[in-house]
Amino acid sequence: MTDLFDHMAAPATPASAKASQVRSRSRFAALSPREILLFAGAAATFVWGAWVTKSVAAQGSGQQEFVQLQLQGIIGEYLQAQARSNADEQTAARQTAVFMAALDETVSGLSRSGKVVLVHEAIVGGEVPDVTQSVKTAVYAKVPRPQPVQALGAAPQGQAARVEQEMQAFMAANQGRQRDGKP
C-alpha cells in the first residue's frame, strides 16, 4: 500500500503526463467517443420516432371520415318488399342472399375509401353525414328491387287459393282449441 501512496506523491513523469493528455483529447465534454455515439444514436432514434408518429397521425386523420348508415332500415325495407312479392321461398332466399352480398360489397367499398361507417343507432350526438340513400342507390343498381304483388285480386289464382286454404286451416285449428278450453 505504501507503493500506491508513493506513486501518487511522486512527481508526474513525462510518460504519465503524455498519457493523461491522450486521455483528455479522446474525451469531449467529459464523454468518451462510445458515449457520444450512443447519445447521437438515441437522439436520432427519438427524432425519427417523432417524425413517424406525426406522419401516421396526420395521414390517418386526413383520410378518414365518419358516416352513418341506416343499415337496419335498408335490410328491413328489402325484406318487407321480398315478403310482399310473389317469389317462392327458394327464389326469395337466393335473391336475399344476392342482395346481402351486394350490400356488404357496397359498405366495404365505403370503408376502403377511408370512411368509417357507423350504424345510425350508434350516433349519440354531433353531425355525421348520412350515406343511407347513396348506399341504397348503389345496391339497387346491382340488385333488382323485389316487385310486390299489386293487390290480392291481382295475385295469381294459385297463390291466392293457397293463402286462403292456409288461413282456413289455421282458423279451423285455432277454433277447435278454443272449444276444448285450450288457448
Image (cartoon, rainbow, N blue to C red):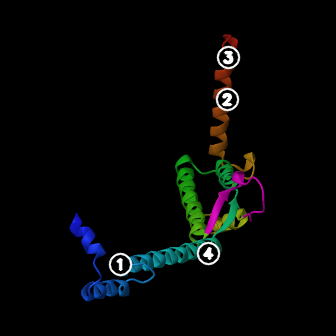
Say which of 172 and 29 sits in front.
29
Mark 4 belongs to which amino acid? Ala
Q: For the residue labelled by badge 2, is the local secondary structure a helix, a strand or a loop?
A: helix
From the image, state whether disc 4 or disc 3 is nearer to you.
4
Asked whether residue 145 appears in the rendered view, the answer is: no
Q: Earlier in the sequence, mark 3 or mark 2?
A: 2
Callout 1 touching callout 4 (CB < 8 Å): no
Q: Position of residue 90 (x, y in %)?
A: 52, 49
Q: Which dot marks residue 168?
A: 2
Asked whether residue 126 appears in the rendered view, the answer is: yes
Mark 2 belongs to which amino acid? Gln
Q: For the residue labelled by badge 1, is the local secondary structure a helix, a strand or a loop?
A: helix
- Image quadrant for the C terminus? top right
Q: Which residue is mark 1?
A: 34
- Is 74 part of what is drawn in magenta? no
Read off the magenta span. 115-130
Spatial CA span between label 1 and label 2: 96 Å
Q: Which dot marks residue 183?
A: 3
Q: Tell me what residue is drawn at x 59 percent, y 71 percent.
A: 57
Spatial CA span between label 4 and label 3: 66 Å
Q: Earlier in the sequence, mark 4 or mark 3?
A: 4
Spatial CA span between label 1 and label 4: 36 Å
Residue most toward the right?
A: 126
Q: Earlier in the sequence, mark 1 or mark 4?
A: 1
Mark 1 belongs to which amino acid? Arg
- Location of residue 155 with respect to 102 vertically, above or below: above
From the image, state whether disc 3 or disc 2 is nearer to you.
3
Spatial CA span between label 2 and label 4: 67 Å
Q: Which dot marks residue 58?
A: 4
